[in-house]
Amino acid sequence: MTDTSIENRPSTATDNAHIAGTKRFFAAENIHAYYGESYIVQGVSLEVNRGEVLALLGRNGAGKTSTLRAIARLASPEIRQGEVWLDGEALHDMVAHEASIAGVGLVPEDRRIIAGLTVQENLELAQIAEPIGWPIELLYERFPRLAERRKQEATTMSGGEQQMLAVARALARNVKLLLLDEPYEGLAPVIVQEIERIVREIKEAGITTIIVEQNAIAALKLADRAVILDSGEVVFDGTAEKVLGDEDLRQQYLAI
Ligand SMILES: Nc1ncnc2c1ncn2[C@@H]1O[C@H](COP(=O)(O)OP(=O)(O)OP(=O)(O)O)[C@@H](O)[C@H]1O
Ligand SMILES: [Mg+2]
């Protein structure tokens, strides 16, 4: 059950590192992650309080997706050093399906909607095992477009509708930490607004969220705090207002 690739993990629950890790609802502490020999995530630390929305920003190739994948404990990139804690549980000791059971919900950029299944079947499949989150009827209330299309084969829907399904599917699980990788990518402004409304509702429901977005302004409008990555390292950690008000910072690292 444990991932032997991680070094320097605490050996007992009473180690100082453990105490530090459980202090926050979510904390990634000094994570170093590799694709094979490519060293990509270079000592990233992130903290998110319960119910907060964190915008994780940075230029193309800065390491945002890699950081989300590492947190979700996908097989690559491999964390070789550092710790990841969620609600007192050591994610760094878990593989992806264990992290999912522990409450990590990753909505990847490519959405991973299952072909050949209807919208309803995609949602039912998400609830095939515990822990179950929002009931499907509640999801349909929050995502009326999905309710209209419940019998449609999911991969025949528009990009925006598939994005809604990807988010709904994460909420169908009992998600404690929602990881959204570029949820607005490639979507028309009217659909972006609808996804924004949904993310706001998710925030009101108290779900802790990390949102990665190229559309930094849109992400910052929703976020409480922001972390900016550059070449796999954290170059800024502060309030969303600070980023919105700091033109130099935006130009240097976000090109906006
Ligand atoms: N599977 C992989 N194998 C090797 N290198 C990879 C792999 N995936 C990503 N990388 C490299 O890791 C670095 C960070 O990529 P990542 O996808 O995390 O960036 P990003 O911040 O999400 O960028 P974007 O905004 O373009 O999505 C890039 O240099 C990329 O080429
Ligand atoms: Mg990315």
Image (tube, rainbow, N blue to C red):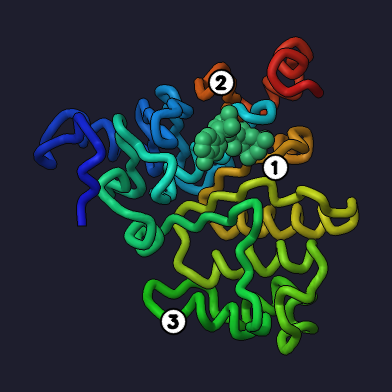
**What's the residue at 24%, 47% (across, down)?**
3
Give the spatial CA distance, label 3 vs label 1: 32 Å
Circle 2 crowding by C-alpha within 10 Å: few under 14, some 14–19, many from 20: some
Instruction: Write down which quadrant ligand 1 falls in.
Output: top right
Name above or below for residue 164 compared with residue 63: below
Q: Which residue is labeled 3 in the image?
A: 128
> Which one is in front, 22 or 249?
249
Query: Which residue type does callout 1 highlight?
Result: Leu
The secondary structure type at the circle numbered 2 is loop
Residue located farthest toward the top when viewing the structure as drawn: 248
Is residue 114 toward the left or the right of residue 1 in the image? right
Number of labels in the image equals: 3
Is residue 47 toward the left or the right of residue 141 in the image? left
Is residue 10 toward the left or the right of residue 103 in the image? left
- Residue 237: x, y in percent? 54, 22
Whether residue 105 is visible to the viewer of this picture, yes or no, is yes
Q: Are marks 3 and 1 in contact (CB under 8 Å)?
A: no
Q: Which residue is labeled 2 in the image?
A: 231
Name above or below for residue 89 compared with residue 216: below
Q: Earlier in the sequence, mark 1 or mark 2?
A: 1
Q: Can you tell which mark lies on residue 222? A: 1
